[in-house]
Image: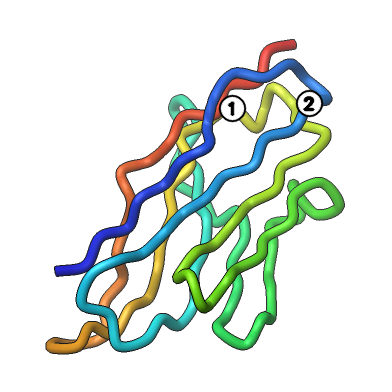
Amino acid sequence: QVQVVESGGGLVQAGGSLRLSCVASGSIFSINTMGWYRQGPGKQRELVAEVTSGGSTNAADSVKGRFTISRDNAKNTVYLQMNSLKPEDTAVYYCNAAILPIRGPLSHYWGQGTQVTVSS
């Protein structure tokens, strides 16, 4: 089985920083793209940032210059460094990983989500 688990959410004041981590574990052969999505109150889930296995990144315009995504392939881990946080960044943040398990097809796996709350 494959698991994806996030950590690092919490409550922070506007202008502050948080670092999210997500680790994939289990019967993994390889991991392609890993990314972070978020879903704010009353909103649809949206892409925040993603990174390929080769290190190429893509980020939403709303977080460019403030959030940085990175990954450690040896640890099957992806990070999201969030700086200059704004109240509108308040959301549940989900990790997503495109994983080829040892047995089975390539699939997208989601974490359980971690709450980020930014107070004004």
In this picture, residue 22 sits left or right of residue 3: right
Circle 1 packing at 10 Å, graded few (<14), some (14-19), many (20+), is: many
Residue drawn at (48%, 41%) of the image: 93
Q: Position of residue 6 (x, y in %)?
A: 42, 46
The residue shown at (59%, 67%) is 50
Q: Quadrant of residue 113?
A: top left
Q: Position of residue 87 (x, y in %)?
A: 69, 22
Instruction: Judge whether 73 appears above or below 84 on screen.
Output: below
Report the front residue among 46 and 57: 57
- In front of the other: 99 or 92: 99
Going by the numbered disc 1, the residue's amino acid type is Thr
Residue 53's place in the image compared with 8, above or below, is below
Query: Can you identify the residue that label 2 sits on?
Result: 16
- Front label number (1 vs 2): 2
Question: As drawn, is 79 to the left or to the right of 26?
Answer: right
**Is the residue under label 2 in contact with that under label 1 (CB below 8 Å)?**
no
